[in-house]
Image (cartoon, grey):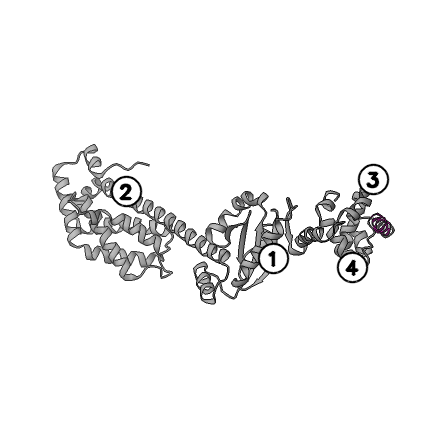
Amino acid sequence: MHNPDPRNAQSVQPICPASAAIWQALLQRVADDIDQVVEDFLAELRGSNLYEDGLVEHADLRHTAHETFRYLLDEMLQKPMSAHQRGAAKRLGQRRADQRVQLEDLMAAIRMDFIVLWRRMRHMLSTDEMPVLVDHTEVLLTVIERYIRDVQLEFIAETARMARDARLATQRHLARLLNTAELSLAATEHIAQGLNVPVNGHFEVVVIHETSVLDAQEALADPLATGQLLGYPFGSGYSLIQVVEGAPTRLSELCAGYAGGYLPQVMGLAQVPSGVASLSSLLEQHSELPGLQRVDQLWPAAVATALSDLLPDFPGRYVAGLQELPATERADVIEAIYSFLGTGSVKDTAEAIGRHRNTVINRLRTFDVATGLDVRIPRQAVLATLLLASPAGRMHK
């Protein structure tokens, strides 16, 4: 809403010369008694319970109140002001933003200026002169509301600058943490201080797979902006770090719907870079993922890739028999094998896939015949795990 200039307000609604003269004299009397006006304001502020959190010192309140009332009165008196005095609203907005004062508290405090000035003016006028104050109420309101608007705009601008600067500083610390080959204890402690995290804390680490980076960043924009989560691009993905202690929600829950890798417990900030690097390397072995995966779900694919370089017949030797099975039967068999490898129990596998235990035994036997791997034997179970984690094995999943 546009607020008209107070001089324009006076011209739109003409006021008789006598009333205008009394108004000017009244403003000057209030200006001459500005110290008492400030005391009235401070008393009003104490009674309001605003600023009780100690963010603003009493001397600061007195100084800014004096500066504000001097500006308001000189504006209504139409006195020439220096560039410094003209900047009162901007300085107040910037100062209170730096002090982390809530915007609604700041606005409420400034609106008390109207109450304080009105009472002081009413106290100074005789009964016969009261119409003068009524005639000029619009001028008083307009000047104060314009001051409030200017304070608010600067408060918002300063808050945005602070957030931008804080994010930039955070990104610099994260870049140093994750991209430095070896960090000294002193450097790690400095980074911890900059990130506002305990150097010996317990951390959760997630690296989002490249296929889900944009979706995850958009969904987690708020906790990233507030610093609840620390995020930084790493490799082809995006790393996320959170202190376990005091976290309202586990990182694994926040990221459950996104493809990526997860480490639930990293001890100490110095270990976070290796955790991020490990997850990133493991994710490179997966072109796609069904969701967030633990390390024990990710490493078989990486080991399978290495094993294919060491064993010329891996995984072809084992996959050939699976390929001869009808597609439906192959899918049923692999489903049972996946479940069994996770539990080691025929009973639990039967419950998990909703089949009779004899059906599970038959599917284990079919897999043994097709691949030569008996998953009930630990060493062969390891090889079966790597087989199903290989690209050829995943193709038949």
Find disc 1 in the rendering and name its residue: 263
**Amino acid found under the numbered disc labelled 2:** Arg
Pinpoint residue 354: horizontal percent, then vertical percent: 80, 48
**Amino acid found under the numbered disc labelled 3:** Pro
**Residue 250 is at least partly visible in this image:** no
- Mark 2, mark 3: which one is toward the viewer? 3
**Amino acid found under the numbered disc labelled 4:** Arg
Find disc 2 in the rendering and name its residue: 146
Residue at mark 1 to residue at mark 3: CA–CA distance: 38 Å
Find disc 4 in the rendering and name its residue: 379
Q: Earlier in the sequence, mark 3 or mark 4?
A: 3
Find disc 3 in the rendering and name its residue: 326
Whether the magenta-drawn stretch holds residue 114 is answered as no
Pinpoint residue 233: horizontal percent, then vertical percent: 51, 49
Label 3 crowd (10 A; few <14 / some 14-19 / many >=20):
few
Secondary element type, mark 3 = loop
The residue segment tinted magenta is 361-370
- Mark 4, mark 1: which one is toward the viewer? 4
